[in-house]
Structure formats: structure tokens, C-alpha cells
């Protein structure tokens, strides 16, 4: 395990800022995956970082960052996502129409009632991650 000392006042408040500082200034071999850069102003717009690490600790103190424990590690903090994507594909996480003969030929509209049925079936934790399930229906 490597140890780095980073002043968050000099690089930014997020763990991703610290990782980028380490890679750019201390250890260019450090490898990690990120999908979006998370900064305070981006967070307010609803964007998030797709970091694939386990963060253990209070950022004002010593903080340990590990690769996710249930995944194989490619290098440093980069997990092998092939098993994740295989599982994701196997559950087919999307809605299917009974009649797929018109697939791609017309737009499918989801009624408010259908959306509410779908959201009611989801686990509450999943509901909170889906914007359509968090918003209340409004008449326009």
C-alpha cells in the first residue's frame, strides 16, 4: 500500500481532486478510473463522478482509498468491470414491449400510470437513483 500526503486546500475538496494531484505531482504511475470530474459546481447541476473506489475515513484526517472489494483489480484502483457488465447485460435492465415488431419505427410513450407502476416495483434505494421516480407528476 502506498501513502501520500495531500493538502486538500491546495488541490480541491474532492477525493478525485486529491487523486489527480497525486497522479500529476507525486506518482504518475497511479491508476484510477473516473467517468466525470466532480467539482462543487458540477454537483449542483446533478452530475456525479463514477469513481470505482472504496473510501474509508474522514477527509480531514487520514483517509484510505481501496479498490472495490468484490471486483478483481486490473491495476491500483482500477477494477475489472467485465463481470459487472456481463451481469448487467444478463438482467436486461430496460423495458420491453410485448409487440417488438415496431421496434425503432415509432416512439414509445410511457404514461404516468405506467411510470408509477414501475417505480412502485423498485427497491427504495433504486427509486432514489432514478430521477423519474423522485419527481412528482405535474399537469402541464
Image (spheres, rainbow, N blue to C red):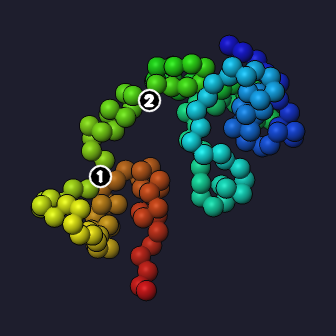
Q: Compared with residue 20, is residue 119 higher up or lower down, i.e. above or below?
A: below
> Residue visible at 37% across and 34% down?
85
The part of the image, by quadrant, that contains residue 104 is: bottom left
Q: How many marks?
A: 2
- Marking on residue 94: 1
The part of the image, by quadrant, that contains residue 99 is: bottom left
- The answer to whether one can see residue 108 in this image is yes
Q: Residues within 10 Å of mark 2 (few under 14, many from 20)?
A: some
The part of the image, by quadrant, that contains residue 81 is: top left
SS for tag 2? loop
Which quadrant would the C terminus be assigned to in this image?
A: bottom left
Q: Which residue is mark 2?
A: 81
Q: Residues within 10 Å of mark 1 (few under 14, many from 20)?
A: few
SS for tag 1? loop
Q: Nearer the viewer, residue 131 or 90?
A: 90
Q: Compared with residue 108, is residue 32 higher up or lower down, i.e. above or below?
A: above
Q: Nearer the viewer, residue 50 or 56?
A: 50
| Residue 102: image location, x then y, percent | 16, 64
Is 127 situated left or right of 50 in this image?
left
Is 35 situated left or right of 72 in this image?
right
| Residue 9: image location, x then y, percent | 87, 40
Confirm or deny contact between disc 1 and disc 2 (CB under 8 A): no
> Residue visible at 71% across and 50% down?
39
- Mark 1 and mark 2 lie on one chain; the one further toward the N terminus is 2
| Residue 12: image location, x then y, percent | 80, 43
- Marking on residue 65: none
Q: What is the CA distance from the residue labelled 1 to the residue labelled 2? A: 20 Å
Q: Compared with residue 130, is residue 91 higher up or lower down, i.e. above or below?
A: above
Amino acid at each position: 500500500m502506498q501513502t501520500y500526503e495531500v493538502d486538500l486546500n491546495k488541490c480541491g475538496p474532492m477525493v478525485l481532486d486529491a487523486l489527480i494531484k497525486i497522479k500529476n505531482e507525486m506518482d504518475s504511475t497511479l491508476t484510477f478510473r473516473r467517468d466525470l470530474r466532480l467539482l462543487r459546481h458540477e454537483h449542483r447541476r446533478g452530475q456525479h463522478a463514477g469513481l470505482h473506489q472504496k473510501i474509508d475515513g474522514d477527509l480531514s484526517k487520514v483517509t484510505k482509498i481501496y479498490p472495490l472489494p468484490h471486483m478483481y483489480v486490473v491495476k491500483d484502483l482500477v477494477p475489472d468491470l467485465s463481470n459487472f457488465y456481463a451481469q448487467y447485460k444478463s438482467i436486461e435492465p430496460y423495458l420491453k414491449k410485448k409487440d417488438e415488431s415496431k421496434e425503432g419505427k415509432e416512439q414509445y410513450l410511457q404514461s404516468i400510470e405506467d411510470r408509477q407502476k414501475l417505480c412502485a416495483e423498485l427497491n427504495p434505494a433504486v427509486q432514489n437513483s432514478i430521477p423519474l421516480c423522485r419527481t412528482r407528476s405535474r399537469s402541464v
